[in-house]
Amino acid sequence: MDQDLVDRIYASSFAPELWPRVMDELSRMADARGGVLFAANPKAINWTSSDCVREHMAAYATEGWIERGRDRRARLMRLRYAGFMVESDIYTPQELETDPTYQQFLRPRGLGWTVSTVMSLPTGDDLFICLNRDFDRGPVEPAFVRRLDELRPHLARGALMSARMQLERARVASETLALIGLPALVIGEKGRVLATNHLMEALTEHVRWRAQDAFSLRDDAADQLLAGAMTTLHDDRSAPTRSFPVRGAEERAPMIVHVVPIRGAARDIFVGCAAVVVMTPVGTPQAPPVELVQSLFDLTPAEARVARSLVVGKSLEEIAADGAVSRNTVRTHMRNVMEKTGCNRQAEVVSLLGGLSPLGAGFPA
């Protein structure tokens, strides 16, 4: 057994960016072109791969093949085999010749022979490792499979450690926000709360804690906005509302919810951290800077100016005159502001924006 490779597998537990190199080395052991590692659950699949097959995996993910390949993953899961498997372990020859993933995706790309394994993680995800061999090279031989099986226990332990490390990072992130006075929680791809801090746990007037590590907002209107923000986390084209008021028991808007997507290098394959939810208080009435209003509620510059002008007491006619625009234009901006802030009345907008506190104010560290 290659001890250097085993060491790199465990190093990847602490540095997920090393997994593509591990996939490369496993692929060389199987005389394959490249490898893919992905963690799948009913709502999402996170993946990484060798550089040489990254383009193919990206196409697999974006062209709908993940859904069409569900049968292959299900077959692997049903077999419950603690080792690597090749096509003949999963399909009959007739099934393989009609399987769309092989016939329409892999073989046209010069691939078409794989060796794969699946592992269940305590996070609720299923971890798949799939090494892809060139079709002209032929099926992966048993000798290569046996070498990979020797490494499988190390791969399973490395993946488990990666998952636990990511959960710990989520916990540290939420606690760091508490140190600067911000109630916060980290949400995974499935809507599960991965970590929360004591400030968020104390907001029982605003937050309802549910079974299976789920949560919701007690304010029904705000909860609908939260659901919309979560379903559009990775689609900025839909212009989702990601900052909005949440009312407490007295029908006020004492808190503002901010949904911050986690993207790029901050994401991890084993625990899909999707977003951080932060709540900031509404404090002493004041006219907030127009830049703050714009950034918090995804407003256009014109919408932000209209909103701030209302806070300082200007009428729609005065706002129109100041901006050299029609009253109808101002009304349009006002409707957009109410929609993006989750308010139903102009007075609610004034109350909300007039009470914005600086981040971190109002909570003990």
Image: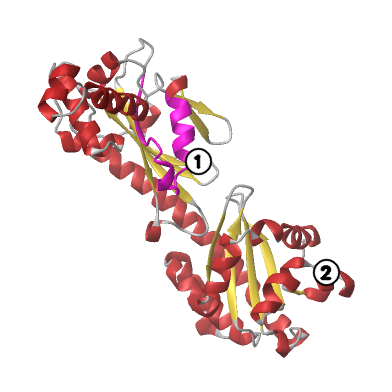
Which residue is depicted at the point 74% across and 84% down? 140
Whether the magenta-drawn stretch holds residue 230 is answered as yes
Q: Using a 10 Å C-alpha cutoff, classify the residue at mark 1 as few (fewer than 14 neighbours), some (14 to 19) or many (20 or more).
A: few
Residue 283 at x, y percent in the picture: 20, 22
Which residue is tagged 2?
Answer: 98
The stretch of residues the image draws in magenta is 222-247
Q: Quadrant of residue 159?
A: bottom right
Which residue is depicted at the point 45% across and 73% down? 18
Left or right of 297: which side holds 133?
A: right
Residue 102 at x, y percent in the picture: 74, 72
Q: Quadrant of residue 115?
A: bottom right
158, above or below 122, in the image: below
Which residue is tagged 1?
Answer: 231
Whether the magenta-drawn stretch holds residue 48 is answered as no
Residue 213 at x, y percent in the picture: 53, 36
- Kindly report the distance in space between the C-alpha atoms of the residues bearing marks 1 and 2: 35 Å
